[in-house]
Image (tube, coloured by chain):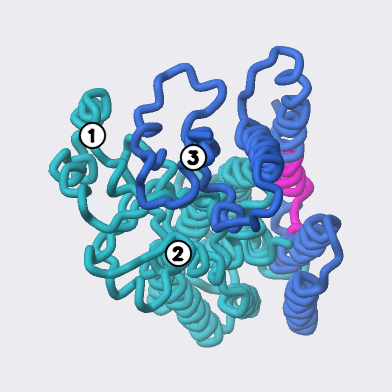
Amino acid sequence: MSEHISKGAALDTNVAATAHAITPLRVYLGVFAALLALTGVTVGLSYADIGPGALYLALFVALIKAGLVVGYFMHLKQDARFHQLIFFRSGAVLVFMFAFTFIDLVSRPAIVAEQGTLVLGQEREQVAFEAELRQRLSAAKAAAQPTASPGPSAAAPAATPTSAALATAPVSDASPSPEAGATAPRPGGADAGTPAARSR
Amino acid sequence: MSKPTGDQAPLLQQPFLQHHFHSAAQQEASAKLGMWLFLAQELVFFGGIFLAYGAVRYFYPETMLSAHEHLSVPMGALNTAVLITSSLTMALAVHAAQRGALRALRRNLLLTVALAGAFLVVKYVEYAHKFHDGLLAGNYLTAHGMLDDDQGARLQQAFRLRASPEQVHFRFDARYPVTREALLRAFGAHKMPVRAITRADAALTVSEPQLAHARAFNGALDDPAVWGSQAGSNTFAVTFAGKPHIFFGLYFAMTALHGLHVLIGMLLLGWVWRRAGRGDFSRAYFTPVENVGLYWHLVDLIWIFLFPLLYLVR
């Protein structure tokens, strides 16, 4: 029992002693200047084309800024160990949350390939499928009339009847898609040229 | 310990000490512990929505790259600077409280509130622009602000049908000649990639299952009268590439949640400012100032991550 009390008292004095040590003004101003400078760095980096590493660099800079805010403005650096533990354990929870979610997300294409069903990456595969169809269509066209120049349908290839119907009818969607009829232009409609490709 | 803490002052000089606490130091430790637990919860709370952002970005990287072009980097950078400055004034307020400088405390609290207000004003300007352009979340994204001036002037309605939520329907003045190519150009000029455009007027004759679908939802946009009136009008169905409506959904969810925190922060700062004026605080007791300060710095902290992720995607 007495042990508990002494522990509590120790916590009291610990908190009081650490939290009330006054941070000098120049530390605040220095941290402020560093935060502004790092913001400038992030904005500058976003204009420089440095490829896929940009995201991680931006996040790294953001982490440094976060460290400055938490450490100096929020005084966590000189705060009680227990408060540090609480805060960083929350950070650890986030790390686990992100790690396990992304392990799932990243491994999904493999599962999809195995089971032959499309779950979330559907859109991408669909686009690739459409591109292939379009290519075949234009190849067939070129073979049929070798002298013809690419018409307006080549300028906007995504709007051919085949792909327009595809775009609104997901491959794995079991339910009938009511909009398919609403989007495909009817033969003889305003889209001159494209319906001919279908009738051929 | 050389500093005068609450412990050493006589009991009667500690009107702030509530009866259920053993000592002023214990009261302060409890308040701080509670605050840090709350902040830890806030981290995970915001973490969830950051995770959603990460998942969307993983699956639709092109969407993130194209849609973020509609956010203004100067505005975002300005707001970052405003928030960082407000964090400084908040830290200075706590600094003043620690030294017992009550006038400096009140002045810095007021400055912090003013900067928070400035942040919200900039945010308002940004939001107004997005609303004006129709760059909104989910089904509300029409992007009609991307049309060129002539098209915009003749646009009668931009809407989505719940039966075909992927497409935005643009209905123009029937006498005005709009071509698919002109629409493509207009959207292309504003970096709004389009996957498909079809003339919808001829095709929008309603089949029985479609009508049943529309009746099931019975939304204003699915009113069969609207469907029927499509015939002979000048209507195009546009499917945007990628998922811009999800990007703007995330944008509004993240920034509005953060904005709500700013608003709550302003109320808390005002409350502390009032208490400081009432003489509640002294060198021996200013825990509420410290805790509101912790909250305010966390709001800044979250913006530090929001800004590069939303505005500076490359």
> Which of B309/B225 is in front?
B225
- The outermost residue toward the top is A115
The disc numbered 2 marks a residue on which chain? B
**Where, by quadrant of the figure, is residue B89 drawn?**
bottom right
Q: Which mark is residue B183?
A: 2
Labels 3 and 2 touching (C-beta < 8 A): no
Q: Are marks 3 and 2 on the same chain?
A: no
- The answer to whether residue B265 shows anywhere in this view is no
Q: Residues within 10 Å of mark 2 (few under 14, many from 20)?
A: some
Disc 3 marks a residue whose amino acid type is: Pro
Q: Which residue is mark 3?
A: A161
The disc numbered 3 marks a residue on which chain? A
Q: Which residue is mark 1?
A: B206
Q: In terms of secondary structure, where does tag 3 sit? A: helix
Please report the bounds of the magenta region as a residue range. A76-92
- Where B68 sits versus B283, above or below? above
Q: In terms of secondary structure, where does tag 1 sit? A: loop
Q: Name chain A's colour.
A: blue
Which one is in front in this view, the residue at disc 1 or the one at disc 3? Answer: 3
> For the residues marked 3 and 2, what is the alpha-carbon distance in whole angstroms?
18 Å
Disc 1 marks a residue whose amino acid type is: Val
Disc 2 marks a residue whose amino acid type is: Leu
Q: Residue at x 42, y 49 (%)?
A: B198
What secondary structure is the stretch in magenta mostly built from? helix
**Where, by quadrant of the figure, is residue B276 drawn?**
bottom left
The chain drawn in cyan is B
Q: Are marks 1 and 3 on the same chain?
A: no
Q: Residues within 10 Å of mark 3 (few under 14, many from 20)?
A: many
> Which of A6/B80 is in front?
B80
Does residue A70 appear left or right of residue A53 in this picture? left
At which x and y percent is residue B31? 56, 51
> For the residues marked 1 and 2, what is the alpha-carbon distance in whole angstroms?
25 Å
